Image (cartoon, rainbow, N blue to C red):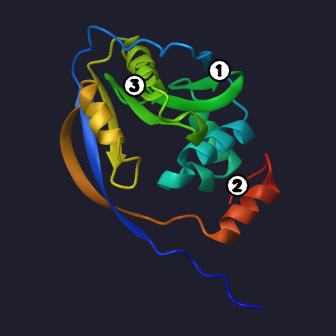
Amino acid sequence: MAKPVKPKSLKATVTHLEMKKPPRTAPPLPVNLHATLMRATAIPLHFYRYLQWQVGREWNWVTRLRMKDKELADIVHAKTTRIYVLSVDGAPAGFFELSNARDANVELVYFGLMEHVRKRGLGEWMLGQAIAAAWAPTPATVTVQTNTLDHPAALPLYQRMGFTPVSQNEAIIRPLSDEEILSMAKAGSTDAV
């Protein structure tokens, strides 16, 4: 039997952005779409991992997928974490996650759409909703980061919506191996890889 091949690590440039004041207006929901955005107050870990996988697998969102249940639960069920799930026509379509863990700052930790709803005008609307939710507790700043492995429209969208780049750094991302993906599929709602 052949030894499993580990995927090569990927280099990425991470851009850190911030917003010092809330925008005056938010983009409207595109017409003829049946979309809902609801806060998930006690999100089940298996559903959270499903969202991470469906939204982020193409962009190498691997950190949360590698976490054990306890470590992941401590983050996503923390009082400082807010997760909102987008549904289109009654089916999950994306999510965003906010963290108030740092003083006077709210971080947009994750934001994305599933492939089946991209290019329908939802990204700008949902980001507007995420920004409004981030500013609800009146922080001093709202921050977000993206990297060169993310969707190519991510950085321009953040800037168009009012975020300003403040710094960059290099990062190494280790994609999930086939073995890790199989382990996640087998695990279901128990500990991840």
Structural distance between the alpha carbons of marks 1 and 2: 21 Å
In this figure, which residue is indicated by the disc labeled 1? 41
Q: Work out whether mark 3 precedes mark 2 in sequence or the reverse, and give the earlier one.
A: 3
Image quarter where the N terminus lies is bottom right
Query: Is residue 153 something one can see in this rendering?
Result: yes
Are the residues tagged 1 and 2 within 8 Å (C-beta)? no
Secondary structure of residue under mark 2 = loop
Secondary structure of residue under mark 1 = loop
Specify few, some or many for label 2: CA neighbours under 10 Å numbering under 14, 14-19, or 20 or more: many
Q: Is residue 35 above or below residue 94?
A: above
Q: Is residue 46 above or below residue 38?
A: below
Q: Nearer the viewer, residue 109 or 10?
A: 10
Specify few, some or many for label 1: CA neighbours under 10 Å numbering under 14, 14-19, or 20 or more: some
> Three-letter amino acid code at disc 1?
Thr
Image quarter where the C terminus lies is bottom right
Tell whether 124 sits left or right of 53: left
Q: Residue most toward the front?
A: 32
Q: Nearer the viewer, mark 1 or mark 3?
A: 3
> Three-letter amino acid code at disc 2?
Ala
In this figure, which residue is indicated by the disc labeled 3? 124
Q: Work out whether mark 1 precedes mark 2 in sequence or the reverse, and give the earlier one.
A: 1
Find residue 73 and report its image quarter: top right
Are the residues tagged 3 and 2 within 8 Å (C-beta)? no
For image coordinates 61% across by 31% down, the residue present is 93
In this figure, which residue is indicated by the disc labeled 2? 192
Specify few, some or many for label 3: CA neighbours under 10 Å numbering under 14, 14-19, or 20 or more: some
Structural distance between the alpha carbons of marks 1 and 3: 24 Å
Residue 177 image offset from top left, x and y in percent = 61, 69
Q: Residue most toward the top?
A: 24
Secondary structure of residue under mark 3 = helix
